[in-house]
Image (cartoon, grey):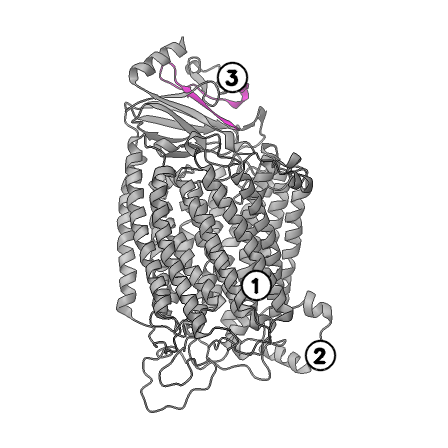
Amino acid sequence: MPTNDTTSGTRRSAALLGIALALLIVAAVVTTLAARSRWWLPPLASAQGRSIDQLFIATFGIISVAFVLVHGLLALFVWLYRDRGQRASYWHENRALELTYTIIPAIVMTGLTLSAAGLWSRIHSAPPPQALVVEVRGEQFGWKARYPGPDGKFGRIDPRHYSARENPWALDPADPAAQDDLVLDISTTGELHLVVDRPVEVRIRAKDVLHSFFIPAFRVKQDAVPGMVTSIWFTPTQTGPYEIACAELCGPLHYIMRGKVVVQTQEEYDAWLAQTRS
Amino acid sequence: MAHVAHAEAQAGHELSFWRKYIFSQDHKVIGIQYALTSMFMAVLGGLLAMFIRLQLGWPGQSWPLLGRLFPSGMPDGQMNQAFYLASVTMHGTIMIFFVLTTLLTGGFGNFLIPLMIGARDMAFPFLNMLSYWLYPPAIIILLASFFVSGGAAGGGWTAYPPLSALPGAAPGSGLGQTLWLISLALLILAFLFGSLNYITTILQLRARGLSMMRLPLTIWGLFVTAILSLLAFPVLLAAAIMLLFDRIGGTSFFVPAGLLIGSVPVDHRGGNPLLWQHLFWFLGHPEVYVLILPPMGMISDILANNARKPIFGYRFMVGSIVAIAFLSFLVWGHHMYTSGMAPVLGTAFMTTTLVIAVPSAIKTFNWLATLWRAKIRFTSAMLFALGFLSLFVTGGLTGIVLAQPPVDIYFQDTFFVVAHFHFVMASAAIFASFAGTYYWFPKMFGRMMNERLGKWHFWLTFVGIYATFFPMHYAGFMGMMRRIYSPQIYAHLQGLQPLNVFVSIAAFVLFAAQFIFLYNFFRSLFRGPQAERNPWRATTLEWEAPSPPPHLNWGETLPTVQRWAYDYSPPDMAEDFQPQAAPAAVPTGRSREGRGDGGHAR
């Protein structure tokens, strides 16, 4: 044997690896516990987010058990079965054992699939009728929003009428519904105003390339796709200011494509709307 | 084929230097050419990762020395956004296509397939040479793109249109993106030539007695990978050509009507950006398995050899490779849960994705069962194989989080995804490549690598990988987006900077540790001790040939296979291994029922 592995070398390697794997388990657990106070999901502020977080925590628990189990067995085996001059056992088939670790993961995966599918279909169900409806549009490199006027209708958009200053939403002046639309730049001067505990449907457009409408606190993310209107609905549960980020690479200044949301009570919202419209 | 080759071997004429080392049709030379070129690209890809970490660790910091080296990308020593995105894009492109794919299939595949199945060469040696010689031009075109106006492509390795389709949309969407597409198209042709060759060779040129169910798992991994490549890469090739036409031919496959870049209307209509995503991930997901099935096979063989024990559950292992490969064609939509794709598809793709966890679990527990009551020797190859197990499990488990669309809403396009695939695909595949290099180096070059340096390399790499990629999960928890030049302006990402500094330093150490490997590799090439024919006391056929094997591999006669590939520590034998080609032992009177070859074709 050209390797310089002596018995003591094997023992040292086995001990090192066993300890390293055990330390890995400890480090993973300790850093995760430490991360909970500093590096965790941002405080939750939406109704849908609660179910998402619960599913995430449940899944995280399951995979943590598997992580500890596999690394624990690995650490144990490399120590116990290091070369000490013994003969390895000629054992390479056990149908019952193999079926066990086929069936158990299959059951766990089925459970996860069912619970995730239920939540997914609730998230993508039709928004409730009392929901606020707003539009946002992603563009290089900011977010714009529009609210329908008192007629409750969004006006038609025609890119031929685009003007960065006068008509940034490219509203069609020929459409009466477009006359009273309220348009805001929610990356610079304005904010996207939402009402606490009132569902909101956000319809998302893109002016140029792909973007992704991401509000971490609401656990909301939906791509803005040129040529399509995508949508997502959710219910903010906490008043206050929040951030919109862009989560899809959209060009060199992708990293500054930030927007602002503010969640208010219905009265505050009504007052803001009346004031802004006048 | 074998007859022709045999006749040529007996003629015994010396090949010229060019035919022997440069335009060689010998699978071993081509394999080594692929491996060395991949190593060169790996250094480049790693260097680009260092740029990414330099920026994320210290955003806004000026590095005057680097500024002098890269005046256009880092004017006054401060990295500009376009250069950052080019680094991100090219790091991914190079590592996935130009390093791991080429190294695993082109390097290990070429070298090992004929040797492990007892053939003299590939079925189509000329096609094989052609396959390699498409690779350097692809590299030259890719690297040239750094020096064109606007720099290299900056749209990510996924090159999502319209960003990648509209030259006016970003600096990196200029000529650099066109060159990226041409380079990729060339490389895909190389993969297709290779895959055709591997499939034909494995089906047609196996030694006598080597039935499919006696193949080592390395060959199973490479065989199924070749089928995956052959079915998936043409789709990306077609998509790349369509995108090229959108860019230079005025077509509109991926660009819809009514777009404005700034205030400039875009003259396209009728395309759909989601079409690219479907086509891209139809390749992109099988590609992940192109990078992980050969490692799974190689790891199985290296584990069995160093545990001196048969691989546990050979049939389940083969079955799970085939199952994973089949399922990999049905899961591409899990990259698109938030893309605007119909939500019902999200449910379907989640189901197929979570099913993959089952064959993956089978493989993991079979590897663990292989170690149970084994006799483990800790060679460098074995350490990397055990490290692979850990990385594959760590990365695979976070896949279960991402597979669920409601949870993925939050984690999509965050660093949690970056951490996930760097464990399960990148690090795991790299660990298998290192394990394979330490294990097969003696066969490739007839010399041994230094075990002491190998162990240092392992420990620094193993710790370095966990220190680099594990904290990225936490950045993902906080919601840090991928591909951002700096997280600093976001309120929800405040407090992240110490973590990013830690990750960057760990990444530098990890990168530096790889020079131990390079030193060991090149030093051993010239100074390593002579290798025996079978230094690891292994069972598989490649160890029957001399180290290194001569042209056409075998002498007068081809080996004949007597048994399966895993006869380690068989009962009633003094030796603790019995090679596949060793003549059947004289029966000793004891029952030989239940041995691994029982039931398999003879």
Which picture quadrant has residue B84? top right
Residue A4 image position (x, y, % from top left): 51, 73
User: Between B340 and B172, which is closer to the camera in this rendering?
Assistant: B172
**In the image, residue B272 above or below residue B92:** above
Chain of the residue under label 3: A
Disc 2 marks which residue? B13
Chain of the residue under label 2: B
Disc 3 marks which residue? A167
The range drawn in magenta is A140-165
Label 2 sits on a secondary structure element that is loop
Kindly indicate whether the residue at mark 2 contacts the one at mark 1 (C-beta within 8 angstroms): no
**In the image, residue A175 above or below residue B485:** above
Judged by depth in the image, the label closer to the viewer, 1 or 3, is 1
**In the image, residue A152 above or below residue B324:** above
Q: Amino acid at mark 1?
A: Gly
> Residue B201 magenta-drawn?
no
Q: Residues within 10 Å of mark 2 (few under 14, many from 20)?
A: few
State how far apart marks 1 and 2 are (Cα): 26 Å
Q: Are marks 1 and 2 on the same chain?
A: yes
Chain of the residue under label 1: B
- Report if residue B125 is visible in the image: no
Q: Kindly report the secondary structure that dominates the magenta region of the rendered protein.
A: loop
Quadrant in the picture for the C terminus of chain B: bottom left
